[in-house]
Image: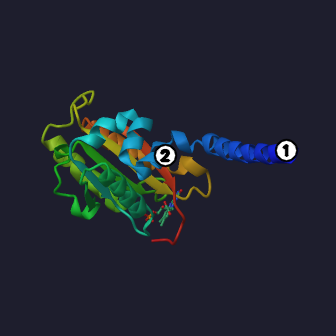
Amino acid sequence: MEEAFLKLWRKFEILGEILKKIVTSGRLMDPKYWLLKGIRRASIVCPALSKVLRTGKALIVYWSATGNTEKVALAIQRGIKRGGLEPIVKKVSEARGEELYDYHLVCFGTPVHHSLPPQPVMRFIDEKGKEYRDRGEVRLSAPKIPGRSVLVFCTYSGPHIGLNEALPAGKYVRQFFEHLGFDVKGEWYVVGEFHRWV
Ligand SMILES: Cc1cc2nc3c(=O)[nH]c(=O)nc-3n(C[C@H](O)[C@H](O)[C@H](O)COP(=O)(O)O)c2cc1C
């Protein structure tokens, strides 16, 4: 009897440890984790994303030389699809003609090259910025346009100073969308393996 009790006790201890690990790892509070698992749960963890993920049109734009940013873009696509939406996925070279205001949610992904987005991403932002400025869409104090949200994602390696290597790239993309009046729902920084110089 005593042995059976001890066995049961040990089982609970192991389960408790596993549960503690999951909770303290912060994974449960990370919308990224839930977004990859499915929109419904992502919406619960991150209510800010809830509405845009249930209604509306989504566009995913990214650039990737060695595949890391593409992986994240496709994982986001899968997550959004599970929620019943059909996001359009484009590389920056294919997205030049896109009207960004046509989408309720734009997910924009870039790797970090020397702490900033790489040239093709910078060029996209320069060109689009000029287009929207010429159209008078860049206004003083950048008033938010209702129902237009953006999610910025960056992949980086961070071998020298960690996340601080990636922040300038994420912030650069963020300020571009903020100038256009998008509401930034999140900046996601994902560590990606360094494959090779490009
Ligand atoms: C030319 C070049 C410069 C890079 N510079 C940085 C850097 O300054 N900081 C950093 O954390 N990672 C840097 N990396 C690593 C990439 O950001 C990382 O591997 C990223 O996930 C690559 O994305 P991709 O596979 O989508 O191209 C650099 C990679 C390359 C090729």
Q: Does the residue labelled 1 lie within 8 Å of ligand 1?
A: no
Q: Between residues 9 and 146, which one lies in front from this camera angle?
A: 9
The spot of residue 187 in percent (x, y) is 42, 43
Q: Residue type at mark 1?
A: Met
Residue at the front extreme, as displayed: 1
Q: Are marks 1 and 2 in contact (CB under 8 Å)?
A: no
Residue under the image location 16 percent in, 49 percent down? 99
Is label 2 in a helix, a strand or a loop? Answer: helix
Q: Residue type at mark 2?
A: Leu
Q: Is mark 2 within 8 Å of ligand 1?
A: no
The spot of residue 171 in percent (x, y) is 42, 43
Q: How far apart are marks 1 and 2 (CA)?
A: 59 Å
The spot of residue 184 in percent (x, y) is 35, 38
Image quadrant assignment for residue 145:
top left
| Colour pattern | rainbow
Residue under the image location 38 percent in, 39 percent down? 43
Q: In this view, does 96 lie above or below 144?
A: below
Residue under the image location 36 percent in, 46 percent down? 39
Q: In which quarter of the image is the C terminus?
A: bottom left
Q: Residues within 10 Å of mark 2 (few under 14, many from 20)?
A: some
Q: Is residue 52 above or below residue 193?
A: above
Image quadrant assignment for residue 102:
top left
Q: In this view, does 45 lie above or below 118?
A: above
Residue hosting label 2: 167
Residue hosting label 1: 1
